Image: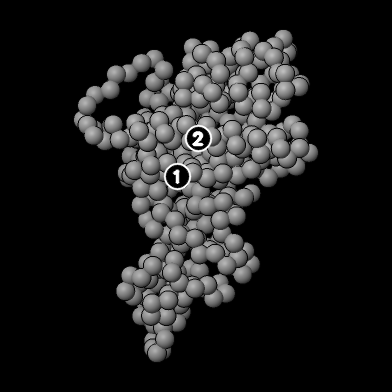
Amino acid sequence: MFLRNAWYVAAWDYEVLADTILERLILGRSLIVYRTEAGEPVVLENRCCHRGAPLALGRKEGDHIRCMYHGLKFAANGDCIEIPGQERIPPNARVQSFPAVQRKRLIWVWMGDPAQADDTLIPDTFSIQHPGWRTKPGYKLFRANLALIADNLLDFSHLSFVHEGSLGGSAAIAAATPEISVIGTRAIRIVRRVSNVDPAPYHRRLVAGIGKINRWWDYELSVSGMFIMTSGAEPVGQDPGNHAGALMFHSCQALTPASASSTHYFFSHAHNFALDDPTVTEATYQSIAAAFDEDSRMIEAQAKVLGADPGRALVGIVADAALTRYRRLVVAALEAERAGSV
């Protein structure tokens, strides 16, 4: 059901402070996330090996976690290192640990084979923490599976309708033909452009008196749900590829399955203009967060309709090309993982 040999975002840095024990459901597993004294992230299963008590109700003691039911203490690698009133610790007294690292402001976890947890595979989310960009991180929980959210991201024609009053603003977006390509075996790339259109409502919030613009979106979506996009809007008549005076954005969106019917949505939509104006960063965040609420209303309602009659066939249209190719990549990745080749 889930692709396990992949890095998933478990939390933003601000969610896991020095004294935090964060409980989070990822790939159907209840986990805890905390930090060592040195600030390194730790991810353990949220279940004491003794009587199954949740470690999220435990207590941090240095780099360790104390179960507050019967007092067993666990090291960051999951080994039980202390049992009150008992000197001998059974060799199977441990909880499962998972490889975890922090990159920029994101805490990543590897839920599959630990031997394959290569942190060089973590995607570059540079704009989250870069002097040339400004952003405010966000998080939402979608009550729908990752596949439906991926469908939404792969077909930006929905901007003309779902986001008519926010990120869209033009029917030309839906009419534009996207350029679709496959990146290796684990990602798909889409480029979409529109010319001489009215700015979106959120552009007007950022720039007073903005006129007709050209817009573009260039993004990749991996089979594990990592979405990275460069997008922008520039004045009509601008030399192609110049982008001088353009409103440029870099978006990092991580879709982490919580369960078969819910998905964590971590997002950042950075801008590289008006760097010294925090109101632009806040306005950008508010626009994006509101647009994702628009997405969630539609996708969660869609999930209920589909769940009520799961065997009913859907009618395909030309705009589904990217969705179809992406789902084939996901199926191939799952099959390869089951076969042990990745």
Q: Residues within 10 Å of mark 2 (few under 14, many from 20)?
A: many
**Dot label at residue 141:** 1
| x and y percentages locating residue 261 in the rendered image | 34, 43
With respect to residue 149, does 89 lie above or below? below
Badge 1 amino acid: Leu
| x and y percentages locating residue 174 in the rendered image | 48, 15
**How many tags in the picture?**
2
Compared across the picture, whether 266 is left or right of 272 comes to left
With respect to residue 269, does 137 lie above or below? below
Label 1 and label 2: CA atoms lie apart by 10 Å
Q: Which residue is mark 2?
A: 292
Is the C-beta separation of discs 1 and 2 under 8 Å? no
Residue at 59% across, 54% down: 13
**Dot label at residue 68:** none
| x and y percentages locating residue 131 in the rendered image | 75, 42
With respect to residue 202, does 264 lie above or below? below
In terms of depth relative to the viewer, which is nearer, 138 or 321?
138
Q: Is residue 181 visible in this depiction of the protein? A: no
With respect to residue 225, does 87 lie above or below? below
Q: Is residue 174 visible in this depiction of the protein? A: yes
Give the quadrant of residue 224: top left
Residue at 68% across, 38% down: 281
In terms of depth relative to the viewer, which is nearer, 99 or 216?
216
